[in-house]
Image (tube, rainbow, N blue to C red):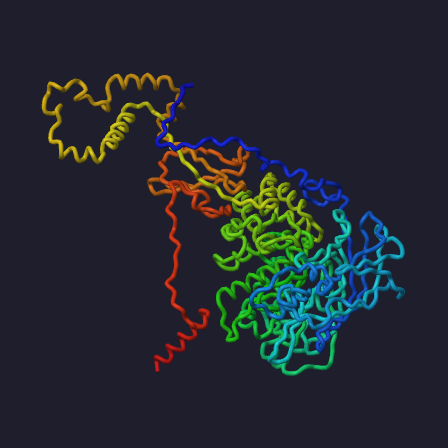
Amino acid sequence: MALLSLLPVFTSFIATAQLQSNRVFEQLGTELPTPNTYRTGSGAPGRDYFQQKADYSIKVELDDVNQRIIGEEVVTYYNYSPDPLSYIWVQLDMNMFKDNSINALSKTGGIDEKMTSGQLSGLQSANSVYGDVDNSRERGYDIKYVKNMAGRDLKHTINSTMMRIDLPEPLTTNQSVQFQIAWSYNMADYYGRSGYEYFEEDGNYNYFVAHWFPRMCVYDDVNGWQNKQFVGNGEFALVFGDYEVEITVPDDHVVVATGECQNWDKVLTRTQKKRLDEASKATDPVLIVTQEEAIENSKTKSDKKQTWKYKASNVRDFAFASSRRFIWDAMQTDVYGNGRKIWSMSVYPKEGNPLWGQYSTKVVEHTLKTYGKSTIEYPYPVAISCHATPRGGMEYPMISFNGGRPEADGTYSENVKRGMIGVIIHEVGHNFFPMIINSDERQWTWMDEGLNSFCQYLSEQEWSRDFPSRRGEPKNIVSYMRSDPSQMQPIMTNSEQVIQFGNNAYGKPATALNILRETVMGRELFDYAFKEYAKRWAFKHPKPADFFRTMEDASGVDLDWFWRGWFYTTEAVDQDLAEVEWFSLDTQNPEIVKAEGRAEHEKDTETIANIRNRTDIPQTVEEADEKYRDFYSSYDPYEVTPQDKQRYEAYLKTLSEDERKLVESGMNYYALKVKNKGGLVMPLIVKMEFEDGTEEVVRFPAEIWRKNNIEITKTIPTKKRVKKFVLDPYQEIADIDDSNNAFPREPEKPTRFQLYKSSSRASTNPMQEARQNGAAATQGAD
């Protein structure tokens, strides 16, 4: 084989980085638990996988006068584990609001120049989680009794938000135990998960009732009893079971809840039942209770009561909403085109219109449809969206409490509209994560919030073109990824220790999954593996390793490097295109070589001195007197001679046919030196902008860093000459510094500022301005 030489067209020197110790591509190994017969190495449930069951029969009364919950329940708990249980653990979440709870005693904070009374009380009280909560009343559960079915007291110990019930004898495998609990508690202002909203204009309340009853803890093969205290951020770890719930409320209230109502024929009017029948055949929402009826209903308060009866099967929790102020709309549609119809419903006060009447129920249906494409088909008979608060949202099986409220005049900004649609998608989407794919929220917030935020992003993009999703797009996580490392923690951090909760548990994992789908795995492989995870772990209790392993097992893609970087570290992506060297093959063709030499020589001699000398020196000595001229005075070193041609022909004879084609191809070779300044390895995506105005994007997998994760050189051959190289041209890897992504470097963009003049004008939204413009136009016409 002949030796082909490369000529550097322009060069820059960088000292070669020494090979670094590289653990980035090591298998997770000891970081993940050892597979066993309960949970396999493939990420699937093993042959000995088990989970417990808890059935509830509950009677509850909502005291509308005192804003109080009074309940009693019979719990049937089934032990399907191989272990005898001498005691069982029950969650008492409302005890988080007691002043001696861990939530209260572990609060930190200082004194600001201006503080509300609620903020001050929050420093010493548990009654402030997401805002000011009235602490004038005693909070937490008042447990009346814990008895067996014979009416005898069961020994129990309350430890803050947990209660241990000691059993008279161990509960063995495949056996069950029944017991009764009676309790009550005072409700609080809606604080983000549960409570009430008071409306001063008519003296009425909207109630949103959640984690309101003593609930069984999870017992599994990994933790035994999951009895970690409820402190506030880490939500719920719950057991599947069947529910029969009787809810007694004032007889002018509308109640919606987890499950299906068993006595609509008794609690609804004839007109409401007729409208429900119409809604069961409709493709658009039908009003069951109109706004006019809700307003009229709010003018008086009934002193009579009635009981709504609900049943729900194979759910992990139960919540309900109740008010005389509710507008109610619904439709029952064939969401998946398989003949099975699902109710989509919304309840909301008049303050929610016109947004809620126009959008909420259709967004519910849309969410079920789009999530079904990404995971599994929604298995329950109903999904309900309740307007609970101007902002935020919270999820429970088949029912969610959501924000997004117009101005008092009925106008709203686009942000409010998009925010409402987004929060409804997110909270209804939680039916899939964690209500069906039932992860441990108390330990790993990201397993439900992160996965759900990712699916929310997919759903939002199908709602409207270029929907401005808050989370999912890599560019949206950049500001967090470049923030102070001391204020960041790995995604694999317990829920109660997480700093920057929204970015860590929602935004970063959602972004990571989007990057996996779009950049690392591709849509086809990702979608199959993600759906497989949902199918494997529907109605079960997955752990992080089950997710990681399933995604690899079902796709055939080694992702340990990705989990390690994105989930176990706080490193960021910062790829620096430090240098580019341009090479071309030395063809040794004298016609080409000497022509290029002449052009280069002419360029080199075009100096400012030579330009001026042509005028200032009319004639040189050599030009004036021929006796000082010789062969070289007229010699043209760039003229092709017969000897040049002979040497070239001789050279060509030494080449094979393939080598000759390569020499004559005119290929350019660009050696790109890329530094990994952020620490997080990612695929290398390079856009080439050619001199002829065309572009091309080439992609290289993350394994390009496997031998050296500090600095690499990648050579790219191309027939066209490249004018410019750009890394990550589509903002798909969350690179925190795009100023070093181009070569040659691009000039920095200016930081813009405004000439400011103070103004006392109140801000308005575009709808209000449009109304004002319309009024002005009408006046002008007169």
Which of the 4 image quarters holds residue 239? bottom right
Could you say where residue 296 lies in the image, as x and y percent from the top left? 61, 81
Residue 41 appears at what percent x and percent y?
69, 40
State the count of labels: 0
Drawn side of residue 696 relative to residue 232, left or right: left
Most foreground residue, 367 or 341: 367
Q: Quadrant of residue 330?
A: bottom right
Whether residue 480 appears in this view of the structure is yes
Q: Percent from the top left, x then y, of residue 91? A: 75, 60
Picture residue at 10% right of the left edge, 24% below the top:
624
Residue 354 drawn at (x, y percent): 53, 72
For the point 86% across and 64% down, the residue is 147
Viewer-proximal residue among 781 and 196 = 196
Camera sees residue 283: no
Position of 96 with respect to 767 (left or right) is right
Quadrant showing the C terminus? bottom left
- Residue at x 64%, y 59% (from the top left corner): 108
Q: Residue at x 53, y 31 (%)?
A: 19
Vertical comparison of 490 with 256: above or below: above
What is the quadrant of the N terminus in the image?
top left
